[in-house]
Image: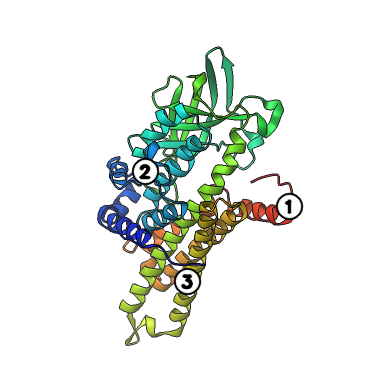
């Protein structure tokens, strides 16, 4: 058992860190306040091969591993969680669904430009009444000759207003329940398809989150993604992988909060001493560092299992659950160490707390992760995943 990154992975980590600190860090506060980052950021990610990290080179990707992807996500999230989240939705949800279920023609037409960064993707499962409860899905797709006609809306869609390509789940046969949900590829500019309300979020504010609206949106039959009725089933497999990325996202935020706390504790003087000299602060930092290390190892284990082709549903959920909750706790401790300054925007730890909370909600809440883990361990048939 080797807990070390390879030489290539260490170089990847260094490269992404230098990019994030040079290209993202100087603008993170501004983008957080403006609730957007420039489209050019996607182009810069593409230049490094980060828009298609895990996809084969034949489809425009970089041909790297899931563990490589986790390294990328941690390093980006350590500096700007909003950019990292937008990349995750593009890569691990939209592109992943096309890679998993798409025909060769669909991969050539849609995955290649996504992996190259020529297009940006989004993925639509969640609705006002549906998310983990797929039975609540109201968006429909009705076959009409050589077309499918989509009607309905999706909510909380990352990249909703900026995406060129969307993968959307819709009901094709309500009588079949979860096996009556299918996936479709919808391209920007399609008549009847538009972005709706942009959400004004607590955290990861630079990442666009919007509603998607479908009003008698006609798409070619060829845009059915995968087998009719298998859209939600495929979604479960995609989320197993996606949760590894979100776990790494949380680890990155936690690492940033830890580093900020250590620096502040050594610089801040009280009673004639750096506050790092006080045992109360030392114990906080020791707990924070231990928790970050544990979260990272859980994430790397899940990634390694996937790279080995082994079952990893429970392990992915364990990593996401632990890392997501840990990032919130560590960000809170970071604010406490910073005292009053931690409550201001002059220091980044308040943003880390706002950003960290997403890790306990997105791609399945912490409560859903506990249900998934218990179901896998006990061999139960779960209601949700």
Q: CA distance from mark 1 to mark 3?
A: 34 Å
Q: Residue at x 46, y 77 (%)?
A: 286
Snapshot quadrant of residue 334? bottom left
Looking at the picture, tell me which residue is in the foreground, 48 or 64.
64
The answer to whether residue 217 shows anywhere in this view is no
Looking at the picture, tell me which residue is in the foreground, 173 or 3.
3
N-term-proximal mark, 1 vs 3: 3
- In the displayed orientation, state which residue is furthest to the top: 145
How dense is the environment of label 3, judged by Cα within 10 Å: few (below 14), some, or many (20 and up)? many
Q: CA distance from mark 1 to mark 2?
A: 36 Å
N-term-proximal mark, 1 vs 2: 2
The colouring scheme, among rainbow, by chain, secondary structure or one colour, is: rainbow
Q: Secondary structure at mark 2?
A: loop
The answer to whether residue 27 shows anywhere in this view is yes
Identify residue for label 1: 379
Given contact means CB atoms under 8 Å apart, are the residues at marks 1 and 3 in contact? no
Identify residue for label 3: 288
Q: Residue at x 57, y 37 (%)?
A: 128
Residue 167 place in picture, x, y as percent? 49, 32
Badge nearest the viewer, 3 or 2: 2
How dense is the environment of label 1, judged by Cα within 10 Å: few (below 14), some, or many (20 and up)? few
């Amino acid at each position: 058992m080797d807990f070390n990154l390879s030489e290539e992975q260490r170089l990847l980590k260094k490269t992404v860190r230098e990019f994030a600190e040079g290209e993202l860090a100087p603008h993170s506060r501004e983008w957080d306040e403006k609730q957007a980052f420039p489209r050019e950021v996607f182009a810069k990610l593409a230049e490094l091969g980060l828009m298609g990290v895990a996809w084969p080179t034949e489809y425009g990707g970089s041909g790297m591993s899931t563990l490589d992807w986790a390294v990328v996500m941690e390093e980006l999230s350590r500096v700007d969680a909003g950019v990292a989240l937008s990349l995750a939705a593009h890569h691990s949800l939209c592109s992943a669904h096309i890679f998993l279920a798409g025909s060769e023609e669909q991969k050539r037409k849609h995955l290649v430009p996504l992996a190259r960064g020529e297009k940006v993707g989004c993925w639509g499962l969640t609705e006002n009444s549906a998310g983990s409860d797929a039975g609540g899905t109201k968006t429909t797709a009705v076959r009409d000759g050589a077309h499918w006609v989509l009607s309905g809306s999706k909510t909380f869609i990352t990249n909703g207003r900026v995406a060129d390509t969307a993968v959307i789940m819709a009901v094709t046969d309500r009588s079949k329940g979860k096996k009556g949900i299918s996936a479709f590829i919808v391209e920007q500019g399609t008549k009847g398809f538009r972005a709706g309300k942009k959400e004004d979020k607590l955290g990861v504010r630079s990442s666009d989150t919007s509603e998607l609206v479908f009003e008698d949106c006609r798409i070619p039959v060829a845009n059915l993604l995968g087998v009719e009725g298998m859209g939600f089933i495929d979604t479960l497999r995609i989320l197993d992988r996606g949760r590894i990325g979100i776990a790494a996202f949380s680890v990155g935020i936690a690492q940033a909060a830890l580093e900020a706390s250590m620096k502040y504790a050594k610089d801040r003087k009280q009673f004639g001493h750096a506050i790092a000299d006080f045992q109360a602060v030392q114990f906080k930092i020791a707990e924070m560092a231990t928790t970050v290390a544990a979260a990272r190892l859980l994430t790397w284990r899940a990634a390694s299992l996937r790279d080995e082709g082994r079952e990893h549903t429970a392990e992915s959920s364990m990593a996401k659950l632990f890392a997501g909750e840990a990032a919130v706790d560590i960000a809170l401790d970071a604010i406490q160490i910073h005292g009053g300054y931690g409550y201001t925007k002059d220091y980044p730890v308040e943003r880390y707390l706002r950003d960290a909370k997403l890790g306990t909600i997105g791609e399945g809440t912490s409560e859903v992760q506990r249900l998934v883990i218990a179901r896998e361990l006990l061999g139960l048939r779960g209601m949700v995943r």
